[in-house]
Structure formats: C-alpha cells, structure tokens
Image (cartoon, helix red, strand yellow):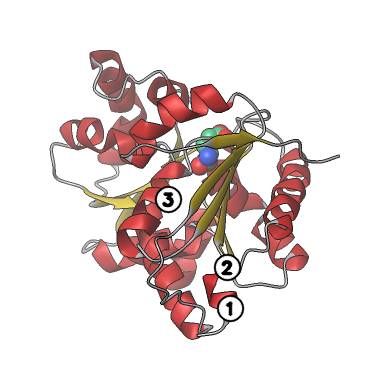
Amino acid sequence: MDASNQKPIGVFDSGIGGLTVVRALLERLPNENIVYFGDTARVPYGSKSEQVVREYTLDDTDFLLSKDVKMIVVACNTVSAVALDVVQKRANLPVTGVIIPGAEAAVKASKSNRIGVIGTVGTINSNAYKNELLHLNVQAHVASKACPLLVPLVEEGWMDHKSTETIAQVYLFPLLTEKIDTLILGCTHYPLLKNTISKVTKGAVTLIDSGEATAATVESMLDQFHLRNTSQQKPNVQFFVSDAPEKFTAVGEIFLGQKLGVVRRVVIGK
Ligand code: DGL
C-alpha cells in the first residue's frame, strides 16, 4: 500500500442527505478516511435548473480536490443525474454517482421488470434513472414520479408522521397502479422513509437504496484502482458545510445513525 491509499474518499451532496451514503460507506468500508462536503448554503438542488446545479457542482468538486481526496462519490441524486460529467471532467480521479449503482441493483432485484423511480424534480425530469434502466434492460417498464414534498418532511424529522404516509400514498399511487415490483429510492433523503414507504406499498415492493448500492460500487472501484486503505489506524471522517454547521450536526445524527463530531463551515465558489 502506498501513501495515496490513506487519502480520504471525498463525498459531496447538496446538503445533509448525503450522510445516508456516508452511513452506507462506513458500514461497508470501515477503514476508509472520508471528507464530506454538504452545500447547505445552497440546498436544495432538486428544484434548481440543470445549469445552476452544474455550476454548483464545479465548486463542490473543487472543494474536495483541495482536500486531496483519492476518489469522489457524488452522493446527491440530482447532481448524479444532471452533472456527473462535470465532476468527471474536473477531477482526474475515479468518480461514481448513485444512478448507475441504483439502477443496476434495481434490475437485479426486479422479477417482473416493472420498476418505479422516485426522486426530486431535477432527477426525474432528467430521465437519468429511466435511461440507465433501459440501457441495462431493454425490456424494463419504468414508472417515475417526482416527490418534492418528501425532502422537507424528512428534514423536519417527520419520517413516521401520519401526514408523510398520506403524502407518500398520493405520490406512489400511480406507480403502484403500474404494478411495479421494485422501487428505486432515488434521493438521499428517502432511505429514511423506508418504513413509511413499506407501509404504503404493503411490503409488496422491493425498495432499492441507491446509497447502499453505491457503497458496493465504491468498494469494487477501490479494488480496481488499488486504492483500499489497509492501514490499522482509526479512520478520520471530516465534515464540511457551506452554512449552519450547528443545524447540520443536530439533524445529521439522524441521517448518519451516529454522532458526527466536529462540523466546519467553509466558503466555496469564490
Ligand atoms: N440531495 C438531493 C438528492 O438526492 C436532495 C435534496 C436537494 O434537493 O438538494 O437529489
């Protein structure tokens, strides 16, 4: 192992949601150092134009590059859908988003080839998941639905609230009518709604957590590029945000499933 293996994996998201991806990474790759950046000053990305998301993505990438990361994981579904190429062009490093891993996991899981996708307006309008699913399986029947109200409900901590279940029911109704057997949770926040969504789907639909699928992809990329950290030292996980580190620390615990430690504010895009 050379010194570059000990460099951190860089992960970024529009805000706090990407911590669900960090959680999956920590579970699968407990030896790895991680630098996380959440663009909390400019969240949400999911309702913004493609052009603006691409501009923000460049700043997010440059911040991670300034931390000398060994690879970049785009945790944000919206960025993965509309701006992955921006990261790939800027960083001369291995890069993965969440769309391809999520689509691959869904195609593997589905028996009927009838797959649902939910995400932000930006993700759904881009058709990124749909195109990837059809690329992987031309027989796939894909039903997509943007669910913009779910992100604020999760950020309010209303994961198991009756109102959230009612709203999820309205969003998922057209997908269930299409008789999907698999549903891609195509947004960083949705893994926290697994219980509520399972209730709505009556447990009859396999839920695909793109974050978990991405952690598996990261593991194989580290092996492919000989970048695994095999050092016995306790790994270092650092968190940076562009606004309100206190709020990020408090709410972040729910997303990460453990305490965060120090969260620092940084100014980017200048
Ligand atoms: N992180 C975003 C995503 O996964 C959700 C929040 C936002 O709209 O920025 O698409």
**Disc 1: CA contacts within 10 A as few (<14), some (14-19) or many (>=20):** few
Residue at the disc numbered 1: 3
Task: Name the element at disc 2.
Answer: loop
Amino acid at dot 2: Lys
1 vs 3, front mark? 1
Q: Is residue 140 visible?
A: no
On the picture, is 60 further left or further right than 196?
A: right
Picture residue at 67% right of the left edge, 55% below the top: 64
Residue bearing mark 2 = 7
Q: Tell which circle, 3 or 2, labels the residue nearer the N-terminal end.
A: 2
| Picture coordinates of residue 138, whole percent (x, y) | 42, 70
Identify the residue shown where x is 49% and y is 70%.
Answer: 135
Q: How far, Cα to Cα, is label 1 from label 3?
A: 25 Å
Direction from residue 57 to residue 194 in the image, left or right = left
Please give the label number shown on residue 206.
Answer: none
Question: Which residue is pictured at 57% across the width and 68% down the height?
Answer: 7
Label 1 lies in ligand 1 vicinity (Cβ under 8 Å): no
Q: Three-letter amino acid code at disc 3?
A: Val
Q: Position of residue 140 (x, y in %)?
A: 37, 63
**Mark closer to the chain start, 1 or 3:** 1
**Which of these two is toward me, 267 or 153?**
267
Q: Which mark is residue 21?
A: 3
The kind of secondary structure element at disc 3 is helix
